[in-house]
Image (tube, rainbow, N blue to C red):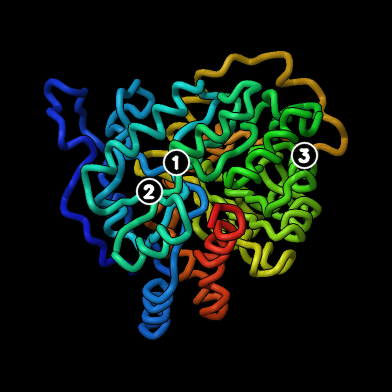
């Protein structure tokens, strides 16, 4: 409930010896990295915010709970370090924790699912979120339910039974593709949109039967529409925004948002990578995410909007800068895209165009900042019920409709 978590001070892998069992290095701070964002709320409005998060389940539909190295976030890491302290000081009751992207192998997927739970088994704040009852219990017991997700499923190869295996190891949501295509479909940054493959169609059906939420956050436009049509269950778009407000391939056209909502799905708005900017708020901040949330509420209705910040504890913008500086220009980067296609999403370009005095996403810099969505919506005149749906109840409903009872 709210911020009164039952954390006992446990830190990742503290049951092991850091001098002999794994490499230890300084990590980013989990609290007070940057000044708090000021929404200009009155005392009564802030009290409303606190009551909303105390009385309702709060769910991030897409985040990364890693604490990154203090000095070099690109260094190889034997183990991921989770932000138990940061979670304990958040209002989160459940997090869709995304551990892998960039085309992992099956060994990496299994390692993420197994090693995460090995760490969680030695503490009492986080519990695996395997059923809806786990999320409800987490809130009741002042814990946090961890919903395991991976950002794309290339690691299954052509074996549909791998969906069942991952489910058995705790997976409860998964993306079909990442930014580039795989054997299941087309990614959002391809020049040509081939949509969903036959195997991708079969995977969607198997995910429906098994109980893994279909996440199309990194799918191309046609892949999104075909996955929504193929799915017998509501689908999740876990971290995007509206193309009407910011025109690039990472954002969604209204056609896809409406199709998702008509099948009962959720569009969760992101923050990371300085992605969902708007004309009114050209520099990345929580205001950009709020602009996209409010726009989508108007387009699809409040029952189909959520929050998926896609953040972690560390310098997220710097990770895009490092990635951009390692890029090798290729002819495909300059091929003309079809007239109907939006510009490619390039977080590196957004990063280097950001003024030096604006080095982070103000007000939505890490997963614990999700409370600022409630603050912004209170300021902007939304009701308690509407805010509760956006910050958690819609996600709970989606889980209830997709997971085994």
**Apparent side of residue 376 relative to residue 281 in the rendered image (left or right):** left
Name the residue tied to disc 3: 342
Q: Residue drawn 35% across and 61% down?
A: 138
- Residue 273 placed where, x, y %? 53, 41
Proximity of marks 3 and 2: CB atoms separated by less than 8 Å: no
Judged from this view, the residue extending furthest toward the bottom is: 44
The span from disc 3 to disc 2 (Cα, nearest Å) is: 38 Å
Do we see residue 220 in this rendering?
yes
**Residue 165 placement (x, y as % from top left):** 51, 32
Query: Residue shown at 51%/45% (left/top)?
Result: 172
Task: Determine which quarter of the picture holds residue 117.
Answer: top left
Examine the rendering and report whether any part of residue 362 can be seen: no
Real-space Cα distance between discs 1 and 2?
8 Å
Residue tagged 2: 128
Secondary structure at badge 3 equals: loop
Q: State left or right for residue 47 relative to residue 391.
A: left
Estimate the x, y position of residue 367 in percent, counting from the top left.
Answer: 40, 52
Q: Which residue is mark 1?
A: 170
Disc 1 versus disc 3: nearer the observer: 1
Vertical side of 386 occupied by 226: above or below: above
| Picture layout, residue 123 above or below residue 292 | above
- Which element is circle 2 on? strand
Kindly indicate whether the residue at mark 2 contacts the one at mark 1 (C-beta within 8 angstroms): yes
Please report whichever mark, 3 or 2, sits nearer to the chain's N-terminal start.
2
Q: CA distance from mark 1 to mark 3?
A: 36 Å
Q: Earlier in the sequence, mark 1 or mark 3?
A: 1
N-terminal label among 1 and 2? 2
């Amino acid at each position: 409930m709210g911020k009164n978590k039952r954390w006992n001070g446990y830190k990742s892998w503290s049951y092991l010896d850091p001098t002999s069992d794994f490499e230890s290095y300084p990590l980013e701070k989990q609290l007070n990295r940057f000044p708090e964002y000021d929404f200009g709320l009155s005392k009564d409005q802030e009290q409303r915010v606190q009551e909303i998060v105390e009385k309702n389940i709060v769910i991030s539909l897409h985040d990364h709970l890693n604490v990154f190295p203090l000095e070099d976030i690109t260094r190889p890491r034997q183990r991921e370090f989770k932000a138990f302290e940061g979670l304990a000081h958040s209002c989160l009751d459940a997090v869709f924790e995304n551990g892998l992207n960039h085309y992992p192998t099956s060994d990496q997927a299994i390692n993420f699912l197994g090693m995460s739970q090995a760490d969680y088994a030695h503490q009492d704040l986080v519990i695996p979120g395997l059923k809806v009852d786990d999320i409800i219990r987490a809130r009741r017991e002042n814990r946090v339910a961890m919903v395991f997700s991976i950002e794309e499923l290339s690691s299954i190869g052509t074996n549909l039974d791998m969906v069942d295996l991952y489910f058995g190891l705790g997976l409860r949501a998964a993306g079909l593709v990442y930014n580039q295509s795989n054997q299941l479909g087309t990614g959002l940054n391809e020049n040509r949109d081939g949509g969903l493959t036959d195997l991708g169609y079969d995977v969607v059906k198997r995910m429906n039967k098994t109980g893994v939420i279909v996440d199309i956050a990194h799918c191309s436009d046609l892949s999104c529409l075909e996955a929504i049509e193929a799915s017998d269950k509501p689908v999740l778009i876990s971290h995007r925004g509206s193309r009407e407000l910011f025109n690039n391939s990472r954002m969604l056209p209204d056609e896809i948002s409406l199709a998702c909502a008509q099948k009962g799905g959720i569009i969760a708005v992101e923050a990371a990578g300085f992605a969902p900017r708007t004309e009114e708020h050209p520099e990345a901040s929580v205001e950009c995410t709020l602009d996209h949330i409010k726009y989508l509420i108007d387009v699809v209705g409040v029952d189909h909007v959520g929050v998926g910040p896609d953040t972690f504890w560390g310098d997220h913008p710097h990770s895009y800068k490092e990635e951009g500086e390692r890029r090798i220009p290729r002819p495909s980067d300059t091929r003309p895209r079809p007239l109907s296609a939006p510009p490619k999403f390039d977080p590196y370009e957004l990063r280097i165009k950001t003024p030096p005095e604006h080095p982070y996403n103000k007000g939505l810099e890490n997963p614990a900042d999700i409370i600022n969505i409630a603050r912004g919506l209170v300021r902007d005149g939304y009701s308690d019920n509407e805010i509760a749906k956006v910050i958690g109840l819609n996600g709970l409903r989606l889980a209830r409709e997709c997971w085994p009872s």
